Image (tube, rainbow, N blue to C red):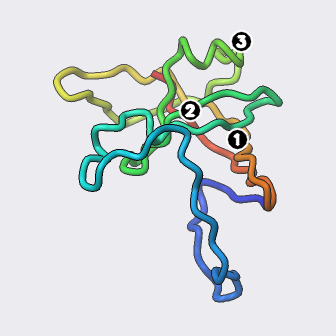
Amino acid sequence: MESYSHLPQLNNGQLDLSKPQDAQLVETKPDRGKGYKAGDSCRTEVVMDNKPTKILLDPGAFCSCVEKSFLKTWEPNFEDQLLPIDGIKFNSVSNPMKALGIFESTVIFPHINGNLRIIVEFVVM
């Protein structure tokens, strides 16, 4: 399976959704209504540049951000591959954040029914 993050992911009516499998929890499931307290619940293991690594999925984010120190752990010379980022400002809750550029990478989500490969553009902070 392959997907591109910059294209809309539309259901064309041909997807078989009849037998979904529940995700397996790595940790104890929090009480109902208390999932927000499980900060690691959105962490998953993926493969990036043929190296397994854990990432945090943020389904509410409008873009995928990565800290430069994390990026250096699996791509030491990432600075040479950065694409420019223009005309956008990023802020944390209380402070402005400086974006260094865009880093494009292939991310593979391993799954027993077929791995999903996505080309992702990360904003490097």
Estimate the x, y position of residue 116 in percent, counting from the top left. Answer: 74, 54
| Number of marks | 3
Name the residue at 56% across, 32% down: 55
Q: What element carries label 1?
A: strand
Compared to residue 60, the image places residue 8 above or below, namely below
Question: Is residue 55 or residue 105 the one in the foreground?
Answer: 55
Going by the numbered disc 2, the residue's amino acid type is Ile
Going by the numbered disc 1, the residue's amino acid type is Val
Q: Is label 1 or label 2 in front?
A: 2
Q: Which residue lies furthest to the bottom in this view?
A: 13
Name the residue at 53% across, 16% down: 68
Residue 5, image quadrant? bottom right
Q: Residue 55 carries which label?
A: 2
Position of the C terminus by quadrant: top left
Q: Is label 3 or label 1 in front?
A: 1
Residue 53, image quadrant? top right
Mark 3 packing: few (<14 Cα in 10 Å), some, or many (20+)? few
Q: Residue 33 carries which label?
A: none
Mark 2 packing: few (<14 Cα in 10 Å), some, or many (20+)? some
User: For the residues marked 1 and 2, what is the alpha-carbon distance in whole angstroms?
Assistant: 10 Å
Q: Do the residues labelled 3 and 2 touch (CB within 8 Å)?
A: no
- Say which residue label 1 marks: 107
Estimate the x, y position of residue 112 in percent, counting from the top left. Answer: 79, 55
- Say which residue label 3 marks: 77
Q: Are marks 1 and 2 in contact (CB under 8 Å)?
A: yes
Dot 1 or dot 2, earlier in sequence: 2
Compared to residue 82, the image places residue 77 above or below, namely above
Name the residue at 34% across, 45% down: 30
Q: Going by the image, does 52 lie left or right of 54? A: right
Q: What element carries label 3?
A: loop
Q: Going by the image, does 112 lie left or right of 119? A: right
